[in-house]
Image (spheres, rainbow, N blue to C red):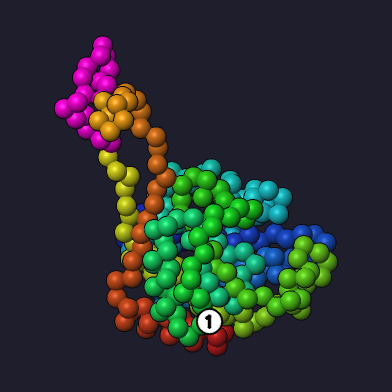
């Protein structure tokens, strides 16, 4: 784990699993994700070590046998103020982002995709709530998750989970592209987040009346009634990150991209 303390205890988690299927070398799944996360940490340390929010890089084990490491991390840290989790799993040269089913993230990711015009990133943001990777335990605790989707060569895909998943398949260019994009994404989320809180419970209206120890409110639209004393359902936390200064974003993108590609 690597931690960049921020001005706030609220944090962005960037994660990757370092285990792989034992029949191969686990180079694509998920050696490249682990390497990208290492480079994200290197770039943040050099160019943006101090941010508004804390940034935490987490390498976890046991993804291939049931998300063991990420489940344990969430079990230990779900009460922390985690704004979002960015998952790096079998990540190629970035072509799109996924908001993981959190609608509020889509506008932010669209702006990031547009700002990263030196890459072939689609402005169309995916928003499906996928499973079976280390973002899943976070998502199930109401924490917004982001995936970086990317281009993989045919031989990188055809040997998924088999003995052909070897280091000769890895593209250094894809690693550099993904490290630059993920670094910008993590930095922007850590410096321009806006958290939205669940709406407060509705106050009893004049149509409410006491009934013993309870307050019952009539619904004027359909004639039904509700118990105002019933516990409100818990709502997942959500955040709406925004880019505050596109000139700063452009500068950071150019610096981080040049550094990653020259590494």
**Left or right for 118, reference 68:** left
Other residues around mark 1 within 10 Å, as few (<14) / some (14–19) / many (≥20): some
Residue at figure coordinates x 33%, y 66% from the top left: 242
Q: Is residue 167 left or right of residue 248?
A: right
Q: Nearer the viewer, residue 143 or 190?
A: 143
Figure quadrant of the C terminus:
bottom right
- Image spot of residue 137 (x, y percent): 56, 48
Q: Is residue 245 left or right of residue 60?
A: left
* Figure label count: 1
Q: Is residue 177 above or below residue 217?
A: below
User: Is residue 106 found inside the magenta-colored segment of the image?
Assistant: no
Q: Looking at the image, which residue is at 21% across and 29% down?
A: 204
- In the image, is residue 104 above or below residue 33? above
Nearer to me, 117 or 42: 117
In front: 48, or 136? Answer: 136
Question: Quadrant location of residue 52?
Answer: bottom left
Residue 72 visible (yes or no): yes
Q: Residue furthest left?
A: 206
Magenta residues (range): 201-217
Q: Residue at x 35, y 32 (%)?
A: 232
In the picture of the structure, the residue carrying the numbered disc 1 is 120
User: For the N terminus, which image quadrant?
Assistant: bottom right
Q: Is residue 106 left or right of residue 175?
A: left
Helix, strand or loop at label 1? It is loop
Tell me if I can see residue 44 in this picture.
no
Residue extending furthest front? 222
Q: Position of residue 47 (x, y in %)?
A: 41, 77
Does residue 208 show up magenta in the picture? yes
In the image, residue 100 above or below residue 90: above
Image point (19%, 26%), residue name: 207
Tell me where residue 153 appears, x and y as whole percent: 70, 78
């Amino acid at each position: 784990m690597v931690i960049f303390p921020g001005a706030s205890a609220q944090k962005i988690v960037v994660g990757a699993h370092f285990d792989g299927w034992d029949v191969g070398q686990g180079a694509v799944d998920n050696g490249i994700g682990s390497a990208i996360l290492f480079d994200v940490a290197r770039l943040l340390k050099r160019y943006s070590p101090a941010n508004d929010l804390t940034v935490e890089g987490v390498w976890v084990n046991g993804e291939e046998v049931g998300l063991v490491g990420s489940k344990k991390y969430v079990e230990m840290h779900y009460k922390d103020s985690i704004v979002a989790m960015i998952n790096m799993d079998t990540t190629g040269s970035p072509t799109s982002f996924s908001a993981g089913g959190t609608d509020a993230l889509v506008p932010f990711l669209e702006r990031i995709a547009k700002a990263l015009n030196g890459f072939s990133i689609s402005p169309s943001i995916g928003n499906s709530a996928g499973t079976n990777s280390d973002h899943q335990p976070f998502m199930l605790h109401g924490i917004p998750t982001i995936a970086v989707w990317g281009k993989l060569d045919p031989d990188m895909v055809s040997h998924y989970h088999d003995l052909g998943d070897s280091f000769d398949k890895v593209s250094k260019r894809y690693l550099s592209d993904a490290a630059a994009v993920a670094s910008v994404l993590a930095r922007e989320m850590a410096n321009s987040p806006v958290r939205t809180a669940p709406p407060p419970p509705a106050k009893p209206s004049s149509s409410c009346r006491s009934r013993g120890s309870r307050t019952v409110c009539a619904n004027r639209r359909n004639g039904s009634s509700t118990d105002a004393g019933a516990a409100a359902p818990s709502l997942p936390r959500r955040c709406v990150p925004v880019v505050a200064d596109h000139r700063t974003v452009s500068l950071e993108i150019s610096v981080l991209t040049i550094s990653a590609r020259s590494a």
